[in-house]
Amino acid sequence: MIFIKGLIPGVLLTWIVSGIIGSNGSKGGMLAIEHMFIQGHGFYWSWPLFLAATGLACALLWMMD
């Protein structure tokens, strides 16, 4: 259940940080920020950042439990 709760802040953090860095034209180095399209909607996304942010959120939620 902690993993499910950790997905929401992980997605939000990834979306916000990738959007800020990607909109400036940077690839983010090791973050590998990509401009993705889903059904005509474009957004910036980074899988390494998503995994790190979700792991961090899960760890924080687990420590609070």
Image: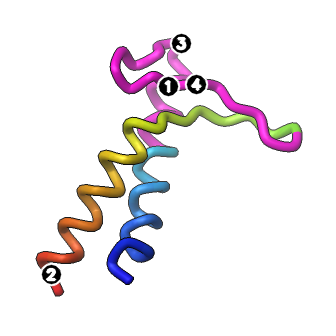
User: How many marks on residues?
Assistant: 4
State the extent of the magenta-drawn residues as a range: 16-39
**What's under tag 2, amino acid-wise?**
Met
Residue 13 point in image, percent of width and height? 40, 50
The disc, 2 or 3, on the residue closer to the chain's N-terminal end is 3
The residue drawn where x is 30% and y is 46% is 52
The residue drawn where x is 19% and y is 66% is 59
**What's under tag 1, amino acid-wise?**
Ile
- Circles 2, 3 touching at the beta carbon (< 8 Å): no
Please name the residue that numbered disc 3 is placed on. Answer: 25
**What's under tag 3, amino acid-wise?**
Gly
- Circles 1, 3 touching at the beta carbon (< 8 Å): no
What is the quadrant of residue 54 in the picture? bottom left
The residue drawn where x is 28% and y is 63% is 57
Q: Is residue 43 left or right of residue 12?
A: right
Q: Which mark is residue 64?
A: 2
- Circles 4, 1 touching at the beta carbon (< 8 Å): yes
Please name the residue that numbered disc 1 is placed on. Answer: 33
Residue 18 point in image, percent of width and height? 48, 34
> Residues under labels 2 and 3: Cα distance?
37 Å
Q: Which mark is residue 34?
A: 4
**Element type where label 2 sits in the image:** helix
> Residues under labels 1 and 2: Cα distance?
31 Å
The disc, 4 or 2, on the residue closer to the chain's N-terminal end is 4
Observer-side mark, 1 or 3, equals 1
Residue at the extreme left of the image, as rendered: 63
Q: Residues within 10 Å of mark 4 (few under 14, many from 20)?
A: some
> Residues under labels 1 and 3: Cα distance?
10 Å
